[in-house]
Image (cartoon, rainbow, N blue to C red):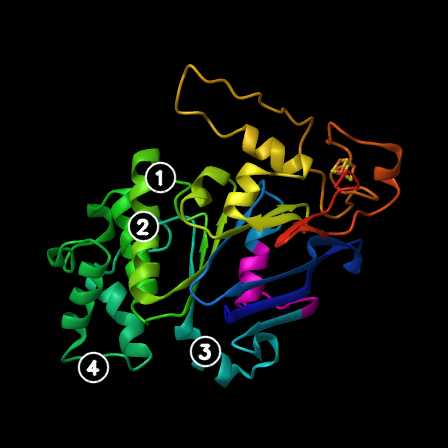
Amino acid sequence: MSEILLEVNNLKKYFPITGGFLGKVVGNVKAVDGVSFSINKGEAFGLVGESGSGKTTIGQTILRMNEKTSGTVKFGGIDIHNLSKKDLKALRPKVQYIFQDPYSSLDPKMRIGDAIGEPLLEHGFATKQNVREKVEEIILLCGMSSNYIDRFPHEFSGGQRQRIVIARAMALNPEFVVADEPVSSLDVSIQAQIINLFSDLRQKKGLSYLFISHDLSVVEHLCNRIAIMYLGVIVELATRDELFSNPQHPYTKALLSAIPVPDPTLKRNRIILKGNIPSPSNPPSGCRFHTRCPYVMDKCSKTVPELKEIAEGHQSACHLA
Ligand code: SF4
């Protein structure tokens, strides 16, 4: 039986909107509005949705880079949001966050060896005497040459920089990594190499991932299970195979239809969604997707569809399911 590493229960994160002279709270951006899921030890869990769906807010709130509005986040059974500052600092090495942009993630004035060595020294994982040796080990583990150590970030391509960012996250031997759109700024050919690196590291180190992406094809080769988000809520959650072979939610179907087919003789019927994702400060009533759904019915604007199990391990939030 799989062991649960991370458990998120009914998590909400609202950002207040202030207005008027006195800066009163006049509303809320409901970035995450009641999300529940769990990630097992050694599992790669994908979170997919358009920009504005709340994926990044979930990733950051899970690791308490944001304070939650309500709900619980348990890591190894411990409620992260109830930890004291001291206990949270002690947890930090075990949980790491990889940001989307490898350019702004690295200090341009810091040599690569120092950027990777800094957290090792700060958390007592290395001494001044052996830090270089440890940095070399990590750099090799992440598929780079040890002569990168004395160079500066501007000497590297986007793909190499992302490897360096990953190496820095791996330095503290984490158990869990949130990777937030880690390949979206890279060329497609480089994307595949970085995904392979994530996959290798997972196997070698027994890591678990929350892998955030707007692109289903990116998570397809890495993730065991995938949750689809729309406007602050999960609308479908299933194993990768089930989601790709038997998608149930109309939004998932639209996302799948947008994946290019490598064979030019094959044609996929692309589902084009109307308009843009609505504002999370004023989400549509009933099913949040009803303003764009090709199958919308009367009931959809009135009743919120529950995220319910429609097959083993497969949940969907749609009145058609
Ligand atoms: Fe579409 Fe209605 Fe299903 Fe929402 S509940 S996805 S609007 S059919």
Q: Give the range drawn in magenta.
A: 57-71
Using the numbered discs, state the Cα–Cα distance from disc 3 to disc 1 in whole angstroms. Answer: 31 Å
Residue 127: which disc?
A: 4
Residue extending furthest toward the left = 147
On screen, residue 32 above or below 117? above
Query: What's the residue type where badge 1 is placed?
Result: Leu
Residue bearing mark 2: 162
**C-alpha separation, residue under disc 4 versus residue under disc 2:** 26 Å
Q: How crowded is mark 2: few (under 14 residues within 10 Å), some or many (20 or more)?
A: many
* Location of mark 1 (residue): 186
Q: Which residue lies furthest to the top in this view?
A: 265
C-alpha gap between disc 4 and disc 3: 20 Å
- Quadrant where the C terminus sits is top right
| Earlier-in-chain disc, 4 versus 3 | 3
In the rendered image, which residue does mark 3 sit on? 91
Contact, CB < 8 Å: mark 1 with mark 2?
yes
Name the residue type under label 2: Gln
- For image coordinates 73% across by 27% down, the residue present is 294
Q: Which amino acid does label 4 sit on?
A: Thr
Which residue is nearer to you in this view: 233 or 100?
A: 233
Across and down, in percent, residue 122 comes to: 32, 78
